[in-house]
Image (tube, rainbow, N blue to C red):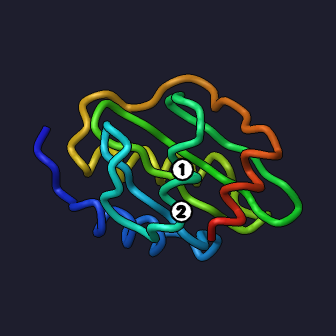
Amino acid sequence: MTASLTPALALEFITALSADIRAGIVLGAGGEHLAGPAALAEAARALPDAPHLEGGTARGAVFAARDERHTIVVVTGPFALPRVTRLDLETALSALGGQTSPTGPPQRLDDPLVSAVLRAV
């Protein structure tokens, strides 16, 4: 599939869909930083390799989606709707040209990992 969005535009698209998103990042398949705040890149690279990830604390939540070409990680406020956020991430991954949409239930992130990503924002 041909990409219809650049990584930077994919982040703009996602943040336009939800006022709950505080920050986001797009990484390439090898973990290279493609878009978003550089401070978030290292924390995002430490997340497990799974198609869908999510976790939250009272401070906020972290959502991630991955296909064969990109990983998108977003940090939200504590009241973001998980299903809607996951769908937005899947839509953005598709627009980045990925062939395989993430499937299955999300893997839960442990609180220490969520907190590490939240601190990076």
**Residue position for label 1:** 44
Where does the C terminus fall, quadrant-wise?
Answer: bottom right
Say what amino acid the circle numbered 1 marks: Ala
Give percent across and percent down for residue 56.
78, 51
Say what amino acid the circle numbered 2 marks: Leu
In the image, taking residue 86 as reference, residue 57 lies left or right, namely right
Give percent across and percent down for residue 110.
79, 38
Vertical arrangement, residue 102 with respect to residue 85, above or below: above
Give percent across and percent down for residue 111.
82, 45
Within-10-Å neighbours for mark 1: few <14, some 14–19, many 20+: many
> Mark 1 to mark 2: distance in Å?
6 Å
**Residue position for label 2:** 40
**Quadrant of residue 76 in the image?**
bottom right
Q: Residue at x 45, y 75 (%)?
A: 16
Extreme residue toward the right, this view: 58
Within-10-Å neighbours for mark 2: few <14, some 14–19, many 20+: many
Q: Residue at x 32, y 38 (%)?
A: 30
Asked if marks 1 and 2 touch (Cβ < 8 Å), the reply is: yes
Closer to us: 34 or 61 = 34
Extreme residue toward the top, this view: 104
